[in-house]
Structures are given as C-alpha cells and as structure tokens.
Image: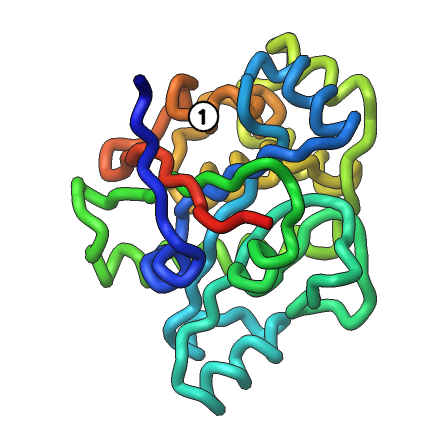
Amino acid sequence: MVEYQTASLQSIVAGANTGDIVLFAGTGFFSSFIRLFSNVRDWSHVGMVIRFKHADDVPPQFAHIRERIERTGADVVCLFESTYANPAVHDLVWPAHKNGPQLTLLQESLEHYHGRSIGIRPLYVRGGRHADDELRRLTACCGDFAATCYPAGYDLNPAHWFRTAFRIRAAQHSTAPMIREGADGYYCTALLVATFIACGIMPPDRGPRYFNLYDFDLNGYLPLTEAYSYGETRFLTGLK
C-alpha cells in the first residue's frame, strides 16, 4: 500500500517557501485532456509559491503587497500561476480578473479550489528549508520576473501545446523563447520553467515550452541546478 504524506491547509501555508511547487488535480474535461497529453496520472495544473517577507523585496509594480507587509508586518504568501481567472479569488495585482499570469493569496486560492486533490512539493536549498539569504534572493528574483510577465495572457496556441506534450525539441534549447512567449502568453508549466530559469533554479539548456506536467510530478524529471532539490509531495487534507 502506498502511504501519502498529508497536511492541513494551515500547516501548508505556514510552512510554504518561495519556489515550492503546488500541483492541482482538476475534475473537468479540460483537466482530463491535459493529463492525457502530459502523460501524468494525477495532475492537471501547477503553480508555485512566492513568500514575500520583506517589503524591500517586492517590485514596485506590486505596491499592494508591499503596503500589506508594511501595514501588518506579516508575510504575504502568494500563489504564482498562469490560469483562467477564478472570480472567487482576488488578484493581488490587477483589480480586474484576467487570464494568464496571476498572483493570489495561497490560502485563498487553495480554499476556493474544488478539484480532486492538491499536492505540495517543497523546494530545498542545499538540502535544507531555511537558507534565508538564498530564499530572500530567490524571492526578489521571482517577484521581479513575475512583474515583467504579468501583463501577458494565457497561451492557447495549439502548436505550443502540441510541442510540449510530445516534446518536439525544435527551437526549445535556449532561453530566447522566454521573450517570445511573453507575446503569446503562458500556460502553467511554461510560466514556472521560465521563472525557474530566470532565477537560477533550472539551467537554461532548454526553453520553457520543453517541459510538461509530468516533469513536475515526483516521478518526472525536472533538471535543477546544483543548489536545489524538491521533496516528496504532501497532499492537502480536508479538500472540499
């Protein structure tokens, strides 16, 4: 029997760090389609955590987050993802709901998710979870990259999806596609890989569209630079 690690929503949010992967298993047709073509059994969407602890690390474009830290003194734990807008979840950057890159409160997003399951894979920096200086650098870098790509939409180009699903490698071996993808928008995996490459979590050997959801799963292959590794998936308990 397979034993799964589980955790409550409160413990996941309290322990989440920048770079942690958040995996979602939806129940609709689109989710089933994604799982089929990504060759992954459980997941249909992925996002990442950005935990802003210091107001100075928040880019100017995210003034609301900076003000919230200065006002409350508390961390702002965000989910960064590219998806369709959920009217029940408040975007921390844009007043109107938009499709594509979004920054929302992690707790609010998880509370309003009505899929089958949610999994969290923690990022380890040099084998640990408390490399404060490196996590602060990583948070500032992820925030800056999020600010630059935030105006982009959601990438619905079927040619891009097809190439990613079947790993067609043409024009996917450099960081140059990150620039071109901004014009086309991002789907979920491309956004995360572009962020990881920009901030040094992944090497720039292949472009963001090369990797699919299977690579983010525990059984997949996500090449990381030397300082980083991912732990096993913890499943959120009490999902409605």
Mark yes or no: residue 230 visible.
no
Residue located at (24% from left, 45% from top): 125
Closest to the observer, 1 or 6: 1
Q: Is residue 148 above or below residue 195?
A: below
Q: Position of residue 158 (x, y in %)?
A: 82, 21
Q: How many marks?
A: 1
- Position above or below: 168 against 88: above
Task: Point out residue 164 in the picture as x, y percentages from the top left corner.
Answer: 65, 18
Residue at 70% over, 38% down: 186
Place of residue 10 in the rendered image (x, y in percent of width and height, measured from the top left): 40, 62
Q: Relative to 56, is 5 above or below? A: above
Q: Amino acid at mark 1?
A: Asp
Residue that lies at the very extreme toward the bottom in this rendered image: 71
Q: Using the rendered view, name the quadrant where residue 75 is placed.
A: bottom left
Please provide percent x and percent y for residue 195: 51, 43
Which residue bears the numbered disc 1? Answer: 217
Q: Is residue 22 left or right of residue 154?
A: left
Is 131 on the left or on the right of 63, as rendered? left
Q: Quadrant of residue 73?
A: bottom left
* Quadrant occupied by the N terminus: top left
Q: In the picture shown, does residue 124 fall above or below 165? A: below
Task: Identify which residue is drawn at 60% across, 19% down.
Answer: 172
Residue 136 shown left or right of residue 105 in the figure: left
Q: Is residue 131 left or right of residue 157?
A: left
SS at mark 1? loop
Say whether residue 78 is visible: yes
Residue drawn where x is 69% and y is 32% of the image:
27
| Residue found at the very far left of the displayed protein | 127
Residue 202 in which image quadrant:
top left
For the residue carrying disc 1, how many other residues have a C-alpha within 10 Å: few (<14), some (14-19), or many (20+)?
A: many
Between 183 and 212, the one nearer to me in the picture: 212
Image color mode: rainbow
